[in-house]
Structures are given as structure tokens and as C-alpha cells.
Amino acid sequence: MPSFEVLRSYWSMAEVATNGVILLNLIGALLLGLMVGYERSYHGRAAGMRTYGLVCMASCALTVIGGYPQHWFGGHIMLITSTDPTRIIQGIVTGIGFLGAGVIMREGFNISGLTTAASIWASAVIGIMVGIGFYLSAMGLAFLCAMSMIFLFRVEAWLPSRHAVAITMRFKKDYLPREDALRRIALSRGYEIAGGSLMIGSEAGLQEWRFVAIALSKHSGATLSELSAELTAFDGIEGFQLSHARN
């Protein structure tokens, strides 16, 4: 078959219609992923709307293209006799996970790089879709991924949310803090201590408490400078550290 005819088959009515169905699936997956991600974002978690949206959409793309093998390579799947494209896809998806894991960093209660890792995996899926000839779907997925990373942080900033603060307090020698008193103080400042985040250590008679405090609402909670001023004036504290947390 002439090369022009092969190229034209990639943009036949059947191929375009299939790509249109795939795009509808991708949009639906993105919206549902954003819904789940918002719940995590609202509670100050590291994986928010963008991460969940990208992962859900890329997973949908890999799943749905498997349902249309007759449209792979412009409908010329019969030309592939010595290789199995699904095994190649499986190897790519497995290998790209190690690359994504390399950009995820954790420092204390802060986790960064999750959205970057998700975008790397989504980029691999875009490459797979181009490779099997679903050009329109690949362009749609690339557009949706780019728009998600560019604009979704503005949507997250507009939606109701609860910011989190990572707090480390080192108490003076022989001072014994109480957890119930600490929780009451946090509530009076517009925060609650996240369940399971409290860690207690001791060295040379000095106790060190580390935990994440989550604001009760988007506009509640003292600022870091206000918290710093209060902790500085507290007699029982030897030293402290404050930072915004995505746990």
C-alpha cells in the first residue's frame, strides 16, 4: 500500500471517531480524579487534585486503548507479526515508575515531587498513544495534562481548603508537656493536631515533639509569624521549627 494511503488511514473516519470516544473517557476520568484529589487537598495532603487527576486520566488512557486493538497503527495491526505491542507497553509502564520515584522527595513532614512524578508517567502514556497511532487522543491528553498543571493550582487556591503546619518543639530540661494541653492550645489558635502525626523523642533530658497542625478552615489559624512569636515567649520551650507541610 502506498505510504500516502497508510498515512491517510490514521485519520480515517473510523480512527477519528475512536479517538473522540477515547477523549470523552479521558475527560470523565480527569473530572473524577479531581474529585478524589480535592478531598486529599482539602485535608492538606501532598497528593492533591493535580496528582490524582493526572494519574486517573493516564490510567484511563492505557485501559481504553486496549479496547480498540483493531484501530492501532491506523488499522494495520495485521502487519505486526513478530512483536506484541502490549508487552512493550507493559515494560514502559513498569520502567517509568522507577523514574517517577526518583523525583519524589521527603523531608520531615513535607513531600514534594508527586505531581512531577505523575506528569512523567502521563508523558509516557502520551508517547504510547502516539506510538500506536492514536494521534488525536495523544494531543488531547497532552493538552489536558498541561492545562491541569498550569491552571489547577488556581482552582485549588479558590476552593475551600485547610492548610497544614509542621511543628517541632524542643522543651527545656525537666519540663514535661502534656498532650491534652497541647491539643487545647492548638484549638484555641485555630488548629487541630493531625491524627497519627505526633512523634515524641528525648535526648539528654530534653523532650522533642513533632506533629502536623491542620487549620480548622481556610481562613482560620494563626500565621507562622504569629505562632513563632507565641512560641518564643513560651517559658518551657528551648527551641522550635515551623514550616508549611504537605503530609
Image (cartoon, rainbow, N blue to C red):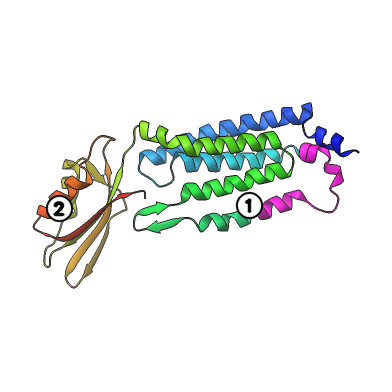
Residue 33 in sight from this viewpoint: no
Q: Position of residue 95 (x, y in %)?
A: 62, 57
Spatial separation of the CA atoms under disc 2 and disc 1: 48 Å
Asked whether 36 or 150 is in front, the reply is 150
Which residue lies at the image location 19% right of the left edge and 54% below the top edge? Answer: 179
Residue 179 appears in the rendering: yes
Would residue 157 be found to the left or right of residue 83 on screen? Answer: left
Where the N terminus falls, by quadrant? top right
User: Which mark is on residue 231?
Assistant: 2
Question: What amino acid type should be assigned to the residue bearing mark 2?
Answer: Leu
Of mark 2 and mark 1, the one earlier in the sequence is 1
The total number of labels drawn is 2
In the image, the segment drawn in magenta is: 71-93
Quick check: is 91 in the magenta stretch?
Answer: yes
**Farthest residue in the front direction?**
4
Residue in view at x 31 percent, y 39 percent? 162
> Where does the image place residue 10, in percent across and percent down from the top left?
78, 35
Q: Is residue 133 left or right of residue 61?
A: right
Mark 1 — residue?
A: 93
Q: How would you classify the magenta stretch by its main secondary structure?
A: helix
